[in-house]
Image (cartoon, helix red, strand yellow):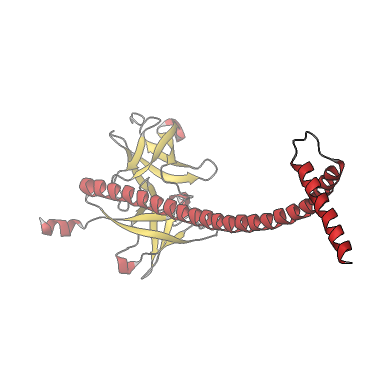
Amino acid sequence: MRNKRLFLMLIGLILFVAIMGFSLSDRKNLSWPEKFINDSVALLQSWLYKPAGYMAGLFEDIRTMRHLYEENEQLRTTVARYARDRSTYNYLKEDNDYYKSVLQFTEAQKNQNNYEYLIAQVIAANPDAYNKTFKINRGSKNGIQKDMAVITIDGLVGLVSEVSPITSTVMPITELNAQSSFGSKKISATVSGKDSFGIVESYNSETGQLMMSKIAEDDPLQEGDMVITSGLGSVFPRGIEIGKVKSKQVGDFGLTYTAYIEPSAKLDKLREVLVVKVPDPEAEGQKE
């Protein structure tokens, strides 16, 4: 048995040396056992590689999707914050530009006419089609009085018709007609830079224009002129813009002319208005 084992070991050693020598020899082609083993291993690797690669790609895609989701949420938050900040910026810029315009306007008017202006916000509008008044958040406690003129920096808006301690009601010039409480308060008007005179006495809701009547035949008023309050009446102070003349035609009986005026103030977009406070002549005289 010992000789048999020794014999087998010797044969195995000889075969091993032969195979090693055969493998290490300079050969151009593989032997068929090597080809078989090589192809078998490659086939097995291909079977194992595809599922392993698929699983690795799946986990990688899951990690990528999670990263993209987190990044997308951050971008959404950033965009929402940007939209909010931009909206706030635009609102503040609009307010800033508006108040700059108001300041420039009031300073210029104060130097010219010595008027004071009380800024008021429009807080409500009357839905009644026959009484289109609106309310402002200033009243008698703020120095508001009945029949004070109400304007914007663009032009005349209306007249204070009712006063409460903290609010007031404004009758707009769109209610200027004989049937309204505005009827007895006609607007004496003139043309800026010209010796002109007329009475603004009604508003046409269809054309959106004011009618100025009692214009003398030789009056220099022409289309395109800027009509302002003359201050001759007892209500509206002088120098407030009313609007531009759009057309002029012969009036009743052919003795006077009638002009149609497009209001300067944007009466359908009122957010804030200015109440004109005219200085008391007696107080001014005492100061002098």
Is residue 232 something that shows in the picture?
Answer: no
> Is 232 or 79 nearer to us in this picture?
79
Query: What residue do we see at 84% from left, 48% from top?
Result: 40
| x and y, in percent, of residue 184 in the image | 40, 53
> Is 158 or 234 nearer to us in this picture?
158
Is residue 280 something that shows in the picture?
Answer: yes
Query: What residue do we see at 60% from left, 57% from top?
Result: 67
122 is higher (above) or lower (below) than 230: below
> Is 213 or 43 nearer to us in this picture?
43
Quadrant housing residue 168: bottom left
Quadrant housing residue 253: top left
Quadrant housing residue 272: bottom left
Query: What residue do we see at 62% from left, 57% from top?
Result: 69
Q: How many marks?
A: 0
| x and y, in percent, of residue 175 in the image | 47, 52
Residue found farthest to the left: 288
Quadrant in which the N terminus is drawn: bottom right
| x and y, in percent, of residue 131 in the image | 51, 58
| x and y, in percent, of residue 286 in the image | 11, 59
Q: Is residue 152 left or right of residue 16?
A: left
Q: Is residue 13 left or right of residue 62?
A: right
Quadrant in which the C terminus is drawn: bottom left
